Image: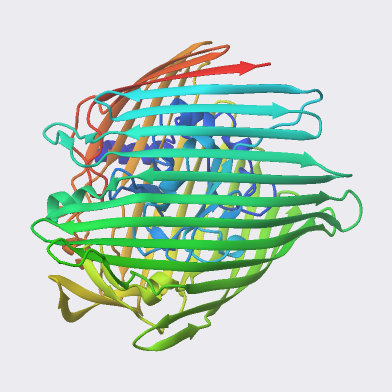
Amino acid sequence: MRVALLICGIMGSALFSFSQVDTASSLKEVVVTATKNQSSVQQLPFSVSVIESTKAVQNLNRTLPESLMGIPGLFIQKTNHGGGSPFVRGLTGNQNLILMDGIRVNNAIFRYGPNQYMNLIDPLMMQRVEVVKGSGAVQYGSDAMTGVIHVLSKTPAYADSFSMGGSMQLRFTEANMEQVYRPELELRSKNIAFTAGASIKKFGDLRGGDSTGMQRPSGYNENAWNAKLKIKLGKDWEWTAAYFALKQNDVPVYHKYVLENFQTNTSDPIWRNLGYFKAEKKYFTGTLRAIKFFLANQQIGETRLLQKRGSTVSRKETDVVNGISSGVDFYQRFSKIWSANNGIEFYWDRVSSKRFDSDLLSSSSYPQEKRGLYPDQSLFSHAALYSLHHLDLGRLNAELGGRYNMYRIGFQENSLGKIAIRPSAWVFQSAISYRIHSSIYAFANLGSGYRAPNIDDLGSLGLVDFRYEVPSYELQPEKSINREMGMKWKSKKAFGSISFFHTQLKDLITRIKTPDVINGYAVYRKENVERGYIRGWEAELGLQPSKSISISGMTSYVFGQNTTQNEPIRRIPPFNARIHLEWARTYFRTGFLYDHASPQRRLAQGDKDDNRIPKGGTPGFNLLNWYAGFDHKKIMMRLYISNLFNVDYRTHGSGINGMGRAASIQVNYRFEK
């Protein structure tokens, strides 16, 4: 099967999924992530993928991370059913940057390796997701070592006269694995537009394929709501205010129950709130053409309940990050061929971390308060200056820029006193795109990225995954150099792209094993001691031989090597591919989705020590899904059969198997008045 997929890759540079990107318009899409200004995907000198909300809804994507499956260069790991961590060109966690409406989701306690934070964004309130690979550090700062994932929320539209619209979405998966209710409302007028929605979700225990059966406990509940208001005030002024909230209850870490003898290991609750205010002023003469300002407040919190089987001691850990951010961007046009974005940004995080241990046999009725996973009331702040320049020279387009970031990290340790460090970093970007033909572009880019050490690196103390971590206080930023070259093409009945990349990594912060053991867990400390590289290729192709038939897909290959340890980089995804065939008429469509992942047997020592990865590596898998849909006027209906052959599988590094054969149904009712 892999040979067949490689042949497809050679002949057509593989196939990219219509289920994720609307191929009819994907290369015409206007994106803002790659340049902080509206740009055509085709002309951009970067690898860019765009996911529209209509496709995510039609494909019954359960979570935002699952919506990203099928993007070339991106792979999803799931520690638990309530998680989902994207790997962008081999890196994940705090080495990837996640944005929402231009505001950083990453905070002071984003940890190395997979985390669940992207699952705290409701996919049902998104309008589109832009994924830029190999770039992002100059545009948005720390953590964009191999790319940026930018979630853009639904935005209401203005209307010449007052009108309103909305929808109700219902979705169910058999065996009580999923129940979703989602009402939305939109109000429109000439100068005011408003939208709001709420999601009520119940996810039962996940049933795996073949012999896996029900994986208990893995289910959880989730509630979310969002609202956005746009107002035109004065000449060419627009103000936007928005608020997003999501809360998950009783989210179990499945493999802890099965593999590590836990009686309780759950997050209850885990939540995220984001509120922001934005103002934009446009000018139509002179050099200055636009000023954009934002002010935001974001909180992410998690309470973990832990108890081993046979133990009388239970633990309650609570971490809350309260962040305030602000920034201003000036868009200037110096001539017909030269424009620029210049700006300044500020971010400030305060970390609250508590831990309470209770002994069920103790005569005391009060839990004992102890040091949390992080030093309580830790502070993490940074400021940045950036300058991005855009050159349009006819056939040739160029992007040049730089950013300088300054950090201050401080906290109090009882044993060591006050700790304060002030790391800094600067990064650059250079990229060109050349139009060979009206529909063919060649591109190349060279840029740097970095990740500043955060509170998780410096001050974590306690059990994380399958290890025990102790603090480290003398860390510097991790650094990357990204090189890429490729080609994009487009015609009326086909589009595609292929790219080759190489990322050099140095000063990597890694966990170093110490001789100590605490409660049966090996003790680790973090240090800047490793170097490595990641290289690979990605390809996508979409064909529409007739009005009714479309075929599309993608392939991705990533190779990562830790040159310091002379072993693979941890958790590197395997070769993977997706192929999609669809037949569609005016109101009806049906199709098949085929997903392939090869075995991953190149393992670092950390992979071999990870109880989520089977001995010898993660087996490959081949999945086939079928769907049918009806869309007419006010009603959209969708039937989806996952994993037709009921295959047992899990994505590399995950702690839970994927869904077995199951039927899902979705009904959307839309109204306008």
Compared across the picture, whether 243 is left or right of 463 comes to right
Quarter of the picture containing the C terminus is: top right
Compared across the picture, whether 19 is left or right of 274 comes to left
Quarter of the picture containing the N terminus is: top left
Pick the front one: 323 or 332: 323
Tell me where residue 607 sits by quadrant: bottom left
User: Measured along the vertical axis of the image, is residue 124 above or below residue 294?
Assistant: above
Compared across the picture, whether 643 is left or right of 15 comes to left
Residue extending farthest to the bottom is 416
Q: Residue at x 55, y 43 (%)?
A: 488
Is residue 22 visible to us here? Answer: no
Q: Residue at x 43, y 38 (%)?
A: 223
Q: Residue at x 50, y 42 (%)?
A: 497
Picture coordinates of residue 376 (x, y %)? 42, 73
Residue extending farthest to the left is 310
Picture coordinates of residue 655 (x, y %)? 23, 49
Is residue 523 visible to us here? Answer: yes
Picture coordinates of residue 5 (x, y %)? 31, 38
User: Measured along the vertical axis of the image, is residue 562 above or below residue 30?
Assistant: below
User: Measured along the vertical axis of the image, is residue 170 above or below residue 116?
Assistant: above
